[in-house]
Amino acid sequence: MNIWKNAAATGVTPPAHFGGLTVLDIVPFKGSNFSVQLSRAPKGGGGELHHHDDWSQVFYMIKGQMTFDTGKERFTLAAGESVLFEPGDPHYTINEGDEESDYLVITVQQ
C-alpha cells in the first residue's frame, strides 16, 4: 500500500503546455506503470497537439470545461464527462470556458 498526502503541493507546468496550466502528481509513475494527476487550467490554458507512443490517458472533468482537438475532431467536455486517448491518438487541449478547469488525467503505460 502507498499513501500520498500532497494536498498542499503546487503543480508544475510541463513542457508543451501553456497559459498557466499546472499538473500535480496525485499518484506518481515512480514504481508503477500508471499515474494519476490533477490538472488545473485557467481560461486559455492547455496543452499543444501531441501524442504518446506507449501511454493511454483518461481525462475526467471535475470542474469547468476543456476543449479537445484531435486534428480530425473537436469537442468540449464538462464536469462528470471523460475521454480516453489510446497510444498514438493526437490531442490538443484548451480551456475556452470562463472559469478554471480541474480534471484528472489517469495515465497507463502499455
Image (tube, grey):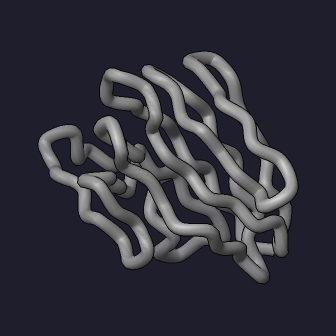
How many numbered marks are there? 0
Where residue 82 sits, quadrant-wise, is top right
Where residue 77 sits, quadrant-wise, is top right
User: Viewer-proximal residue, 107 or 3?
Assistant: 107
Q: Is residue 78 above or below residue 84?
A: above
Residue 95 placed where, x, y %? 45, 38
Where residue 66 sits, quadrant-wise, is top right
Residue 74 placed where, x, y %? 75, 43
Residue at 83 percent across and 71 percent down: it is 87
55 to the left or right of 103: right
Quadrant in which the C terminus appears: bottom right
User: Viewer-proximal residue, 102 or 47?
Assistant: 47
Residue at 45 percent across and 22 percent down: it is 64
105 to the left or right of 10: right
Residue 19 placed where, x, y %? 29, 55
Q: Which residue extends farthest bottom?
A: 53
Residue at 84 percent across and 61 percent down: it is 86
20 to the left or right of 17: left
Residue at 23 percent across and 47 percent down: it is 6
